[in-house]
Amino acid sequence: MTHIYVDADACPVKDEIYKVARRYSVSVTVVANSWMRTPDDAIIEFVQVGDGFDEADEWIVEQVNSNEIVITTDIPLASLCVKKGAHVLGPKGRVFTEESIGDALASREVSAQLREDGLMSGGPAPFDKKDRSRFLEKLDQVINAAKRAT
């Protein structure tokens, strides 16, 4: 059965995930280091892990199975989940696959080095309506792909 895990601490599309999950009757587990409000809905579960570095990521990797879905901005987490056969989607609609995850990890390392050397500042572009729309479209596609594979 299809299931969605949400790396929730910095996820800007939680409400969209809940809406789409209800439409497809897909259960959702929201994972975070600190308490957050989630809808009172039988298909939505909240799991609060400890506040240690990467505890939410580690919990998700332990739980996720092949053909389940993970929503995250964390590239190393995405990589681990892809290796387990999960469908991984970023909040801006970026789909991480076995073919794309190597480039994503490399880009992350280059950006980190440029920031460390003072050659680059700031972070990613602000989240906008186009990102939200792209995410919704890709989430529909990923859920359908996961359902076909089970």
Image (cartoon, rainbow, N blue to C red):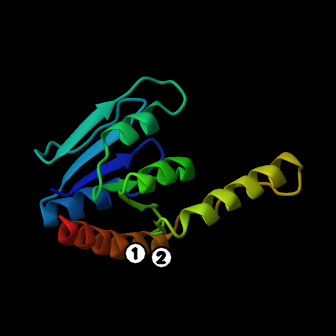
- Identify which amino acid the numbered label 1 is placed on: Ser
Query: Residue 66's spot in the image, x, y percent?
Result: 30, 55
Query: Residue 87's spot in the image, x, y percent?
Result: 36, 61
- Identify which amino acid the numbered label 2 is placed on: Lys
Camera sees residue 12: no
What is the quadrant of the N terminus in the image? bottom left
Q: Is residue 144 above or below residue 75?
A: below
Camera sees residue 47: yes
- Assign a secondary structure to mark 2: helix
Q: Is residue 36 above or below residue 89?
A: above
Q: CA distance from mark 1 to mark 2?
A: 5 Å
Neighbourhood count class around disc 2 (C-alpha, 10 Å): few under 14, some 14–19, many 20 upward: few
Marks 1/2 in contact by CB < 8 Å: the verdict is: yes
Please name the residue that numbered disc 1 is placed on: 133
| 107 left or right of 102 in image | right
Residue drawn at the location 55% of the way across and 62% of the way down: 101
What is the quadrant of the C terminus in the image? bottom left
Query: Residue 149's spot in the image, x, y percent?
Result: 22, 68
Viewer-proximal residue, 132 or 47? 47
Query: Residue 117's spot in the image, x, y percent?
Result: 89, 49
- Assign a secondary structure to mark 1: helix
| 22 left or right of 129 in image | left
Please name the residue that numbered disc 2 is placed on: 130
Viewer-proximal residue, 58 or 98? 98
Residue 38 sits in which quadrant?
A: top left
Residue drawn at the location 83% of the way across and 55% of the way down: 114
Neighbourhood count class around disc 1 (C-alpha, 10 Å): few under 14, some 14–19, many 20 upward: some
